[in-house]
Image (tube, rainbow, N blue to C red):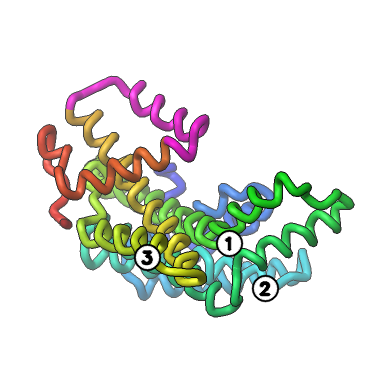
Amino acid sequence: MKLLAAYIMRGRMQAILVTTVAAMLSLLLPPFSYFSGAAVGLVTLRTGPGSGLTVFAGSLLAVGLLAAVILQQPLIAAGFAIVLWLPVLVLATVLQRTVSLSRTVALSGLFGGLLVLGAYLAFDDPASWWMETYRQLLAQAGTEAPGPDMEPVLREVAGIMTGAVAAALTLSTLGALFIARWWQALLYNPGGFREEFHRLAVGRPLTLVALVLIGAAVVLGDPAAAMAAELLVVIMLLFLIHGLAVVHGLVAGVRASVGWLVAVYLLLLLALPQTAVTLAVLGMVDNWFGFRTYFGRSEDDK
């Protein structure tokens, strides 16, 4: 990874090449999209938003031309630009200027929130749109429509689908940004990203936002309640990341075995909803109690 990061920093053309190749490879292997966004992020973090914008524009042109020639789908480039590169460019600029991973992660929630708000402006009832889309996919696949027992379950899932998609896109953006910050640390500040992540705390104001959204989801009627619930999904993702940072910080603080981290990530894979909620609650509570202060200082972003 260090060699790849060093190659990206050799010049803008090299960065454009890595961004473009990774983007095209991600059409076959989606994880490559993280490296595509990370290349834009690394250049922005190290040399500023001007250079990052140059890599963004060059990669947009290159992917557009390749997608037009190979796939006859030039709009694929616009998808990468809007969904991944532009948010990473903005967040990397914020991180470079504030030198605060905590504030940058908290700000990332705006992208997910705007996606949810946009969906509610575009559709009167996004949940119904998801249900109709699901039925159309079943019809195209020649599969029978869900039975009456499954209908309520599908409606529950459809009710949070917009928030889940927004949270997934936010996670992709943060994943690319974290890789970029890690690459930067490998090249210029070994161990720096590890220390930053261990101190990460998204702050008390976001906790208050989450509490307001919970109250709105309970008290208000649809569609306001539904929109509040879907915005909450995005916010809880940020607290999940905060909770993971707490766990990493505590394990490092007490010099515990890395097996504890392995166990936490296995639980995320095997019992995702329960573990994710537990970690998110841990992140929320840590904003007030600062668990890591007993074993090391957390970032003062509260």
Identity, as a three-letter code, of the amino acid under mark 1: Thr
Q: How many neighbours does mark 3 have within 10 angstroms: few (below 14), some (14-19), or many (20 or more)?
A: some
Q: Considering only order in the chain, which callout, 3 or 1, is on the residue closer to the N terminus? A: 1
Q: Is residue 196 magenta?
A: no
Which quadrant would residue 93 be assigned to in this image? bottom left
- Disc 3 target residue: 216
Residue 27: give x, y in percent of width and height. Answer: 67, 55
- Disc 2 target residue: 75
Q: Where does the magenta region start and end?
A: 254-274
Q: Nearer the viewer, residue 65 or 224?
A: 224
Tell me how far mark 1 sits from mark 3, CA to CA. 43 Å
Foreground: disc 1 or disc 3: 3
Residue at (22, 62) in percent of width and height: 205
Q: Nearer the viewer, residue 294 or 228?
A: 228
Tell me how far mark 3 sits from mark 2, CA to CA. 38 Å
Instruction: Determine which of the numbered discs, if any, sits on residue 20 in the image.
Output: 1
Identity, as a three-letter code, of the amino acid under mark 3: Ala
Q: Do the numbered discs 3 and 2 sit on residues whose CB atoms are within 8 Å? A: no
Instruction: Determine which of the numbered discs, if any, sits on residue 83 in the image.
Output: none
> Is residue 92 in view from this perspective?
yes
Q: Considering the numbered disc 3 on the image, is that residue within a helix, a strand or a loop?
A: helix
